[in-house]
Image: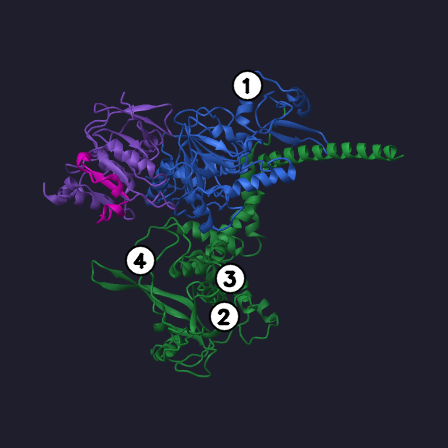
Chain colours: A green, B blue, C purple
Amino acid sequence: MYVAVKGGETAIRNAHRLLANRRRGDPSVPSLTLEQIAEQLALACDRVMSEGSVYDRDLAALAIKQARGDLIEAIFLLRAYRTTLPRFGYSEPVDTAAMQVERRISATYKDLPGGQMLGPTFDYTHRLLDPALAGDEEVEAPESHESDETPVVRVSDILAREGLIENDGVSESEEIGDLTRTPMEFPMNRDTRLQALSRGDEGFLLALGYSTQRGYARSHPFAGEIRIGEVDVEFDVPELGFTVTLGRIRVTECQMVNQFQGSSKAPPQFTRGYGLVFGQSERKAMAMALCDRALRATELGEDIVAAAQDEEFVISHSDNVQATGFVEHLKLPHYVDFQAELDLVRRMRAEHAARRDSDSDSDSAMPEAAE
Amino acid sequence: MTIHTDDGLATYNFAYLDEQTKRMIRRAILKGIAIPGYQVPFASREMPMPYGWGTGGVQVTAAVIGPDDVLKVIDQGADDTTNAVSIRNFFAKVAEVETTTDTATASIIQTRHRIPEEKLKEGQILVYQVPIPEPLRFLEPRETETRKMHALSEYGLMHVKLYEDIAKNGHIATTYAYPVKVEGRYVMDPSPTPKFDNPKMHMSDALQLFGAGREKRIYAIPPHTDVVSLDFEDYPFEVQTFVEPCALCAAHGVYLDEVILDDKGGRMFVCSDTDHCEKRREGGHRGHLAGDARETAQ
Amino acid sequence: MTISEKIARGGFADPVFAAQTVFRAVMDAMARPGAVHGVSTDVRPPSPLNATAAAVALTLADADTPLWLGAELARSDAVRGWLSFHTAVPFAEFISHAGFAIVANPANVQPLSGFALGTQEYPDRSTTIIMQVETLTSGAPMTLSGPGIKGSRTIAPHPMPGHFKTQWRDINGHYPRGVDLVLASENAIACLPRTTRIGEREV
């Protein structure tokens, strides 16, 4: 007897067994440790933490290992874990002005208080493959100096003192939005939008940010400042009457300084685009800042002419876990709907053929009639 | 109650979701029932399966299900398609509920793309997985605009689209996810079921719940509710008909899948609803290929 | 018992399954307006909050849903304390801000149109009013029709708000905006969603 494809359960079990085997690879090669991933693929962990919205390096490393290095899959794993975590409350805003800075550069000043600090950057490396890395050559210890604990002033604060740049902005409502807890609604407030961007796909934001530079909503950006380092995360405990420090996290912050003409009411001021992400991810923070600025078009009274300014378009499509799920769902069976389409197309083709036949019958009758 | 995995590492709440999330979803379900066909926004959670693979339906089922429920999961009408198996196993694991393939015994049926052939009964709940809940989305991509259209009951655009189909193709070219109007008010997407199934939604004895996880919407049709497929006086709504009966159980008037048998154009049509087909065969109904296929298999 | 003892006691003994059971009763009742669903619960709230209304509140209300209490309930510190302890609900200052409302005596309730009716764009942002009633079956009968009802159904709750039928017809007229009612007797519930119409003629 014909049996419709059965045994889905066995198939799934076997597929997962094969996956586990392929994930491990050649068993004669030592298995990666989470420490190795966390230490040596640190920027991959940073991206997974940032877009997975969980600051936990060990879990990010585990996710990367489990996902065989597929970072979007790893981000997905971390998100699915995050959703099960109880929510104790919301931290105070992190104070990036008080950051323990490891890298800090400004493109708008030659020199400035606190100085330009290159930090651990790929910039100015010549992109030549380094055969030495194939082995395990010892690496020089880094140059270091005593930190003088003086906070490094933010470039935006320098500009703000002169009134040259708009204020940091105030939240539209008392409560900070959280798109993981409340349904998204357009138009969005900037707080929720920034949250969406910070969780958004690096590649998507990079392409959109790039498009603004190429004239699709040009915003004349200057990299006012990029800083990477550690900040305290503080939590206000009303019962105690003071804040406690929960720990330190590494973040990358980018403040873009963008041109803006004043109006009859306000003198000319520079405007801001803001990027903040977990870990070290300059590309993402910069792209985010470009997108943030572009998305402020309505607020700043600019015409919406390009994709990067279109809030619904950008925010609805920036989440790579959503995007990959929906694109990949096309591989699920759709044969019921396809059958419905097949039936209609066959019927329409038959009708088309019938029309053509009757047309050609009358066509062939024509010459005779003409004769 | 929490469910522990074998290794004792991770623990989940009953039915995976935490209670706060369940409450939020339950509130959305109640408003959905109170406003039939209206899409209630909800703070959809990230689930341990991909968006687009039934996360909305899974969240609705998880918020509704209890230990006494009997769950059936189908995809394309079949209980044994891989994603249906996967979702059924998920609930068997995180809610320890009884599962079944029998439509009549199930108290909750989660479905993707089909409504069972067997008439659903009072007390049953049909949970649809919905990819794009907005019926107007393909005409107007903006949520801000479509929300206004629903608010004003302004559905002219949909009729224009359907009429353009007729002008261009001589038919309404929508064969699945065919829009319906609920209680004369909201135009609603029935999820990508073939339009063959649309009439089953009308005045159903069962409660119908719709979950769209990625798009973060829940909507509902209470039992005994008016559900009308959009059409025109001169082009009335009609469902697909199949010339042949099911090759295995000889059923007429059911939805059939086309199965390709060889590369020479050989094919057969069999019930898409596997449970319905099996039951008919158990009842002694034989299609014209049922016997032949056995011989081939032997 | 001191107030704080009263407050801490009487919640769900098994919150996960109790909430699921009560929710299913409310969902079924909302899907079949006017049908009476028995609710047996171990919840013991301070009076005058009845056990069924309390169980519905524990099932659906939390920190995200501002709750408004009718005068008789609002007066009781024990009731306020109990609800706030077991659900963490904030209390709504205005009835038009309420996600949920609980009314101990429907005869005294404010005009229904004063509750949150939602907006034309978001009709779901509306109050679900839990009304405590003495009976669902021996008051003045009303004939119901609409979605969820095959033909018609009769319900006879008591007490109900003054000029209820006129008020309800007014609510019907606002559709899709509106309020939804959960009528809670000591051991059963019935619902009237905004789509339910009440017939002219009493049976």
Contact flag, marks 1 and 2 (Cβ < 8 Å): no
What's the chain of the residue with tag 1?
Answer: B
Tell me whether circle 3 and circle 4 mark residues in contact (CB < 8 Å): no
Q: Amino acid at mark 4?
A: Glu
Contact (Cβ within 8 Å) of mark 1 with mark 3: no
Q: Do the residues at discs 3 and 2 belong to one chain?
A: yes
Quarter of the figure with residue C155: top left
Which of pointers 3 and 4 lies earlier in the amino acid sequence? 4
Q: Quadrant of residue C132?
A: top left
Give the letter of the chain under mark 2. A
Circle number at residue A166: none
Alpha carbons under labels 3 and 4: distance apart: 27 Å
Q: Amino acid at mark 2?
A: Ser
Give the residue at mark 1.
B282
Instruction: Name the residue that disc number 4 marks.
Output: A175
Q: Which residues are magenta?
A: C88-114
Three-letter code for the amino acid on which mark 3 is drawn: Ala
Question: Do circles 4 and 2 both sit on a common chain?
Answer: yes
Q: In what quadrant of the picture does the N terminus of chain B appear?
A: top left
Q: Which residue is mark 3?
A: A308
Q: Between residues B169 and A327, which one lies in front from this camera angle?
A: B169
Q: Which residue is mark 2?
A: A219
Q: Residue furthest bottom?
A: A111
Query: In what element is the residue under mark 2?
Result: loop
Q: What element does badge 4 sit on?
A: loop
Q: Secondary structure at mark 3?
A: helix
